[in-house]
Amino acid sequence: MSGLKTKHPVIAGLDIGSTKVCFVIGIVNSENKIEIVGVGKAPNAGIRQGVVVNIEATQNSIKKAKEEAELMSGYQVQDAWVGVSGTHIKSFDSKGMIAIKNKEVSQADIDRVIEAAKAVAVPADRQVLHVLPREFKVDTQDGITDPIGMSGVRLEANVHIVTGGQTAINNTIKCVEKSGIKINSLVLDSLAASTSVISEDEKSLGVCVVDMGGGTCNLLYFVNGSVAHTSVIPVGGQHFTHDVAIGLRTPQVSAEQLKIEHGYAMAAQIGENEVIDVQGVGGRKSRSIPKKDLADVLEARAEETLNLIQHDIKMSGLLPMMGSGVVLTGGASQLQGLIEMGEFIFDIPIRKGVPSGVGGLSDVVKTSEYSTAVGLLKHGFNANKDEYLKQSSTHIITDSADSITKKMKDFFGQIF
Ligand SMILES: Nc1ncnc2c1ncn2[C@@H]1O[C@H](COP(=O)(O)OP(=O)(O)OP(=O)(O)O)[C@@H](O)[C@H]1O
Ligand SMILES: [Mg+2]
């Protein structure tokens, strides 16, 4: 029977963040679900606010993270779905219109109308990353999500187009290719993250996903199940760490450690008598300080960041459509007390988003900092489902063909 053993399609996600590079490998199991089989993580100093500032450093981090994931999984990977984010991302609405061929909408018509919507003038220094359909209109009927099979003569599409700065994108591509990885496609980080942290119901009710990373907060708004708006706030976890380093006069490395181990966003909830050790700068001795002092510093930055997010939501004009509220994800959303503070600041519901919907080593990737990497796998699988499932059946045929050849060889070997 071993010849009929299924070889599962392998799929990989590469998240090149401002603080870390994360490489995740998954397989598509026999129930067509993704199982995580390998995870690799390496610190990265080559990216600032989503933009490559040092190609070699980024390339080394990518290689390291990939090797670690390959070692853990036992799979060698050639290609990956790669995330992009940063202040260079911009998005806008567009429309396309075509005449329906054969009086009934087919997939080819949908492809053509999306192409027509994409044909808007995009400046030479920007690259289109996604064309995300919002709704279709067949003749006078609007609000259609899936027009296939509908009768009519004219098909219109309202789409949301996401673009990135050409230079930033070219440098990301260069880092990945120089690391020996073929890019399946570039995917907006927050779009990938949303695939792993929110449900279809939340998308339908309206939700704002905030990927709080090291250098930036990337916001993605869903209205009626599809992406309606994106924005970037140039504040992330590194700003919290920097405040702690300055406020408590301690090196960045220990500020980062203090934030993660003892940090809290609401100072009022910290007991007066709790103390922590803080390392001095420039060879000065460590000293004990009230834990509340650390929380005071973090509270100011947390409040400012959440207010900036709230302001962005108000300015987007989409607040009344955010029935499912705000979902905070990304490494910086893990600051203790942040969600509680958000409950005071926001008028809409708030929760933390962690990756879900994958099997295998799901425990290793169940924290918010893996939302993008896990989302890249899920997004990649959804975008190319037919191809991955075909690989699975091809492998079965190849395996069985191999096993038949082997059996024939064994058989003839016994005769001669
Ligand atoms: N437990 C924690 N409490 C507070 N902050 C945390 C915690 N864990 C991680 N962080 C912060 O999260 C940030 C990194 O988040 P993440 O890994 O999502 O960023 P990134 O993907 O590298 O960056 P970006 O998405 O901005 O390019 C760091 O600033 C780190 O200090
Ligand atoms: Mg990130």
Image: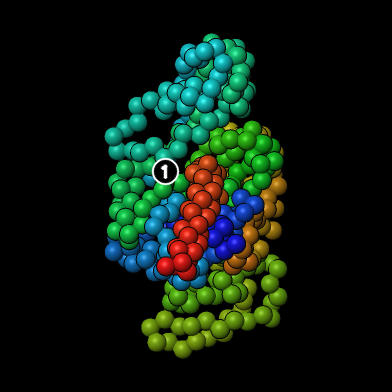
Q: Nearer the viewer, residue 325 or 345?
A: 325
Q: Measured from the top left, where is residue 277 in percent x and y?
A: 56, 83
From where the camera sits, is residue 108 visible?
A: yes
Task: Name the quadrant containing residue 37.
Answer: bottom right
> Which residue shows up at 55% across the image and 37% down it?
227
Q: Position of residue 389 (x, y in %)?
A: 54, 46
Residue carrying label 1: 89
In the rendered image, residue 386, in percent from the top left (x then y), is placed at 53, 41
Query: How far from the left and from the top, in percent, is residue 25?
Result: 50, 60
Tag count: 1
- Indicate left or right for 165 with 240 as reference: left
Which of 63/315 is in front?
63
- Whether disc 1's CB lies below 8 Å from ligand 1 is answered no
Most extreme residue toward the front, as rendered? Answer: 415
- The residue that appears at 49% across and 64% down in the rendered structure is 411
- Amino acid type shown at disc 1: Ile
